[in-house]
Image (tube, rainbow, N blue to C red):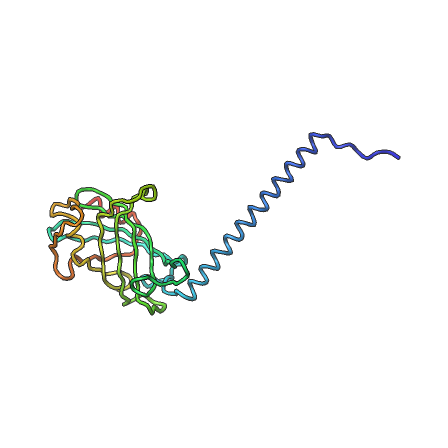
């Protein structure tokens, strides 16, 4: 009885390698597929429990995120500009509500430019009322903005100055806020960053008005170049 064809050893090894590569490609495809399904599932949950997150500012966003910028003037007459973007955040434990307001919370990042030409990368945290519907129009909102550099995770403590606090409401398509004096507590009259706990108070009850208009960072950078 004649033996079957002999497969050269090099070809056999090549087939083994190709077979392993095919398994890796298949596994990668599964991971990508599960990742896409996970994203779709999370978006569906947000659409059910946080419908407002898709209509921040009054029109539909396929991704529940809002970004905008605005200019503000300190009591000393100097201009500042702030750019922010934020998205809904569900705290650990699945509570889905901020600790302080009892309502939904948003988180994101931004940038603040000053009349001295300085730029600060900032962390953005926002709070909304407890019972939010499908629209943000007329709803109150608070924003905490504080410096958080890229290397914050590598050090035990970091300087959070400037730290600004805003309170206001949505007036679609804009977000109209007041700082209650936090800008003038953060910066001196010449735009220089003040030391921590300086105790300086220069604004009235509402303080500086900040109107955030929806837009990308290019608009913010154009405003900064004119400050």
On screen, residue 205 above or below 147 = below
Picture quarter with the N terminus: top right
Residue 70 x %, y %: 23, 54
Residue 187: image x %, image y %? 16, 48
Q: State the residue in front, 134 or 215.
A: 134
Q: Residue at x 73, y 30 (%)?
A: 8
37 relative position to 175: left or right: right
Question: Residue 152, image x and y in percent?
Answer: 31, 44
| Vertical placement of residue 131 versus 105, above or below | below
Q: In the rendered view, would you say 138 is above or below 195?
A: below
Left or right placement of residue 128 versus residue 3 in this view: left
- Tell me if 5 is positioned left or right of 75 in this view: right
Q: Going 27% across and 51% down the picture, which residue do you hit? A: 83
Label total for image: 0
Judge from the rendering whether residue 90 lies leftward or rightward of residue 209; answer left or right. Answer: right
Q: Residue furthest right?
A: 1
Q: Residue at x 23, y 62 (%)?
A: 168
Q: Which percent across, then down, holds residue 43?
A: 44, 60
Furthest toward the front, the residue is 156
Q: Work out whether residue 9 or residue 197 is closer to the camera in this orientation and state it.
A: 197
């Amino acid at each position: 009885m004649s033996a079957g064809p002999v497969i050269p050893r090099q070809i056999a090894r090549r087939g083994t390698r190709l077979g392993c590569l095919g398994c890796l490609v298949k596994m990668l495809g599964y991971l990508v597929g599960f990742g896409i399904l996970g994203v779709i599932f999370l978006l569906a949950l947000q659409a059910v429990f946080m419908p407002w997150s898709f209509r921040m500012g009054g029109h539909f966003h396929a991704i529940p995120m809002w970004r905008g910028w605005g200019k503000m003037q300190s009591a000393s007459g100097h201009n500042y500009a702030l750019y922010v973007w934020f998205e809904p955040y569900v705290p650990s434990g699945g509570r889905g509500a901020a600790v302080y307001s009892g309502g939904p919370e948003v988180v994101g990042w931004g940038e603040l430019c000053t009349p001295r030409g300085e730029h600060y990368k900032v962390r953005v945290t926002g709070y909304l009322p407890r019972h939010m519907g499908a629209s943000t129009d007329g709803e109150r909102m608070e924003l905490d903005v504080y410096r958080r550099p890229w290397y914050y995770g590598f050090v035990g403590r970091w300087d959070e100055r400037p730290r600004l606090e805003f309170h206001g409401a949505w007036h679609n398509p804009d977000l109209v806020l007041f700082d209650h004096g936090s800008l003038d507590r953060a910066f001196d009259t010449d735009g220089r960053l003040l030391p921590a706990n300086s105790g300086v108070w220069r604004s009235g009850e509402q303080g500086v008005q900040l109107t955030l208009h929806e837009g990308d960072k290019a608009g913010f950078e154009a405003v900064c170049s004119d400050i």
